[in-house]
């Protein structure tokens, strides 16, 4: 297994974990109150969601690249 494929799998797993943390954070009571008043999630939650999505996409690309 090549180094790029190993790095890709690691990034994919990290991305999925970060997205799950972000989704879990969106259901927290304090986050729901913030979202109700401002119409958006907190910066920390957004970093989890966006960072996890980007990491998962890059990891998937590295894993599938020949």
Image (cartoon, grey):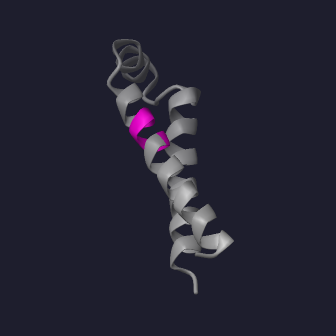
Decide if residue 20 is on the left or right side of residue 18: left
Q: Is residue 29 above or below residue 23?
A: above
21 in magenta: yes
Image location of residue 13, percent across then percent down: 48, 52
Q: Is residue 19 above or below residue 37?
A: below
Q: Residue at x 52, y 63 (%)?
A: 57
Q: Please name the residue shown 44% across and 49% down the image.
A: 16
Frontmost residue, 43 versus 13: 13
Q: Quadrant of the C terminus?
A: bottom right
In magenta stretch: residue 60? no
Identify the residue shown where x is 51% and y is 78%. Answer: 64
Q: Position of residue 47 (x, y in %)?
A: 58, 37
Q: Give me the residue at 63% from left, 62% from top.
A: 7
Question: Going by the picture, which residue comes out furthest to the right?
Answer: 3
Magenta segment boundaries in residue numbering: 18-22
Decide if residue 60 is on the left or right side of residue 62.
Answer: left
């Amino acid at each position: 297994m090549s180094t790029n494929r190993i790095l890709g799998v690691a990034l994919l797993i990290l991305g999925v974990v970060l997205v799950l943390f972000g989704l879990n954070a969106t259901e927290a009571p304090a986050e729901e109150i913030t979202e109700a008043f401002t119409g958006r999630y907190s910066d920390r939650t957004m970093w989890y969601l966006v960072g996890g999505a980007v990491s998962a996409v890059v990891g998937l690309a590295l894993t599938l690249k020949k």
